[in-house]
Amino acid sequence: MNSVADSFGWPFQDSGWFGKMVLQGLIAIIPIVGWIALTGWMMVTIDYYRAGRRELAPAGFHLSRGVGIFFVYVIYGIALGIPGNVLTSLGRSMNSGGLTALGNLLSLAAYLFLAFLAPALILFVYRGGFSGGFDLNGIWQTATGNLNNTFPAALVILAGSIIGGLGAILCCVGLLFTIPYSMAIYAGVVTWYERIIAGPAPAPPPSPAGP
């Protein structure tokens, strides 16, 4: 994977991409369990991409791989969303358009902030499991210390989330494809991000001089 933009096309290099995505999308219909399986499928797909395999992980119940990142995202989403939700609720109860607008603005800011953190956040959970998602200093330092890479990665994450929701236009049937496709995009982003922030491999040591 040479650039973060490759995340969009990489999934289609797997000849069985359609069947894998739709089956994983069907599994994702199951509340909670299906969503955990979907995020686990993303993590296993990262395994494949890191190994240079141009294929998606097999569809399935990848629960052990997904439970960490799923609950990390739930906790982050709730924590970051509290200020906006509180102000929006107050604005509606008080019939205050200003408070409601401010709450909506804060909610949007929280969504964008989570997208900014997402490449580093997913990578830390990939490497360290559930607890890795709360290495706040490490995640922040990685995200802000590599802005030239974090911003494009976050933009692709945002694009992937928009693509994921587009399936709702087709009476939600399209979500069976677009949601797994968005997860495959995320897998590509994290694979690229890990490689690019690591930098080039060190040069091998010089050969010892001959006699």
Image (spheres, grey):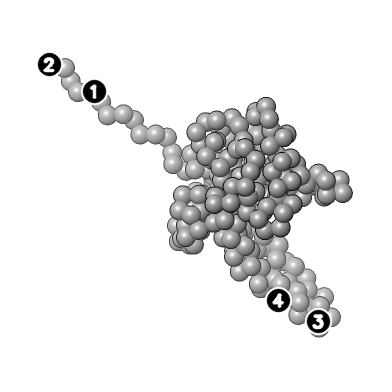
Type of amino acid under label 1: Ser
Disc 3 is placed on an element classified as helix
Q: Residue at the left extreme?
A: 211
Q: Residues within 10 Å of mark 3 (few under 14, many from 20)?
A: few
Whole-number angstrom distance, CA of label 4 to CA of label 1: 65 Å
Residue to which mark 2 is pinned: 211
- Mark toward the start of the polypeptide (4 vs 1): 4
- Mark toward the start of the polypeptide (3 vs 1): 3
Please tell me which residue is depicted at 60% across the width and 32% down the height of the picture: 55
Whole-number angstrom distance, CA of label 2 to CA of label 3: 86 Å
Residue 89 is marked as none
Determine whether label 4 and label 1 are within 8 Å by CB: no
Please tell me which residue is depicted at 71% across the width and 41% down the height of the picture: 23
Residue to which mark 4 is pinned: 86
Q: Residue at the bottom extreme?
A: 94
The residue lying toward the viewer, choosing from 199 and 63, is: 63
Disc 1 is placed on an element classified as loop
The picture places residue 129, in percent across and down from the top left corner, at: 48, 54
Q: Determine the image quadrant of residue 21.
A: top right
Report the side of 75 relative to 163 (left or right): left
The residue lying toward the viewer, choosing from 190 and 100, is: 190
Type of amino acid under label 3: Ser
Report the side of 61 relative to 207 (left or right): right
Q: Residues within 10 Å of mark 2 (few under 14, many from 20)?
A: few
The picture places residue 149, in percent across and down from the top left corner, at: 54, 45
Residue to which mark 3 is pinned: 93
Residue to which mark 1 is pinned: 207
Q: Determine the image quadrant of residue 184.
A: top right
The picture places residue 111, in percent across and down from the top left corner, at: 67, 60
